Amino acid sequence: MPNKIIITIDGWSSCGKSTLAKQLATALGYVYIDSGAMYRAITLYFLRNHIDWTDPKSVKQALADIQISFHFNPKSQQTEIFLNDENVEYVIRDLVIAEKVSDVAAIREVRSYAVAQQQVMGARKGIVMDGRDIGTTVFPDAELKIFMTADSAVRVERRFRELFAKNPNINIEEVKANLEMRDYIDSHREVSPLRKADGAIEIDNTNLTMPEQLEKAMKLVKKII
Ligand code: DC
């Protein structure tokens, strides 16, 4: 398709960013990159290797030992993340990681490391990337910027259902507390806090079905390409 663009999707935790990003990438034949997965993979590495992330020197050293890459898995039909050649796509979704990831993602060195790699991935355009700072910091000149929101009770319910499918011992209060904590840290940190980018178009998907949200976003895309 001529005229490839960059599409950024930012917003609160669990408001359907990755679902929309995957739908758009499939519809357009674009690459989908889950930038949150990078912060989760770094958190996994820090936890496994007992890295003291309050110490900038230890963080820098640890980052030098980390290689992150994304590969399309034809079996799952999705792009999956690898941490030093290990597929960590599923392990990083655990609540243990979710409890620490916002703290790790607030570290300046971690953000520069991730942002630099994200910018390289978008150099040839034809990419949909979701996260918290994609439209503000990573690709401020992106052709289409979307900011997603959804009612917080709906977001808790969605994330609970997702986690419950893997772990029936999970309780909804735990999930709600984690989402509230992450939203707070993500939007109040010093470096690149979550906010709606200049020129971003808001989509509230509280009452939208998946086909409806895709239709809305595709209308925006078609205006551009
Ligand atoms: O999208 P997610 O829930 O997988 O993201 C995990 C965490 O990573 C989230 O709490 C905030 C952080 N994050 C970020 O700071 N910047 C991004 N571009 C993406 C995610």
Image (cartoon, rainbow, N blue to C red):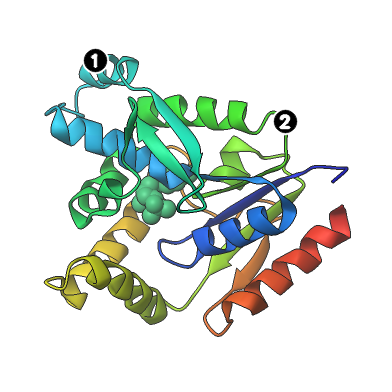
Please count the marks in the image.
2
Residue at point 39%, 76% (across, down): 152
Q: Position of residue 179 (x, y in %)?
A: 30, 64
Q: Is residue 147 above or below residue 39?
A: below
**Type of residue at label 1?**
Lys
Indicate which label's residue lies in the foreground, 1 or 2. 2
When the figure is inspected, residue 18 is found, relative to residue 88, above or below; the finding is below
Compare residues 124 and 116 and report the one nearer the observer: 124
Q: CA distance from mark 1 to mark 2?
A: 33 Å
Q: Earlier in the sequence, mark 1 or mark 2?
A: 1
Residue 57 tag number:
1
**Which element carries disc 2, helix, strand or loop?**
loop
Horizontal side of residue 105 vs 196, given as left or right? left
Q: In this orientation, does residue 176 appear?
A: no
Whole-percent x and y of residue 65? 29, 16
Residue 146, percent from left and from top: 65, 58
> In the rendered image, is residue 204 in sight?
yes
Nearer to us in this view, 199 or 146: 146
The structure residue drawn at horizontal position 36% and vertical position 39%, both measured from the top left corner, is: 39
Residue nearest the viewer, comparing 129 with 22: 22
> What amino acid type should be assigned to the residue bearing mark 2?
Arg
Mark 1 neighbour class, 10 Å CA radius: few under 14, some 14 to 19, many 20 or more: few
Residue to which mark 2 is pinned? 124
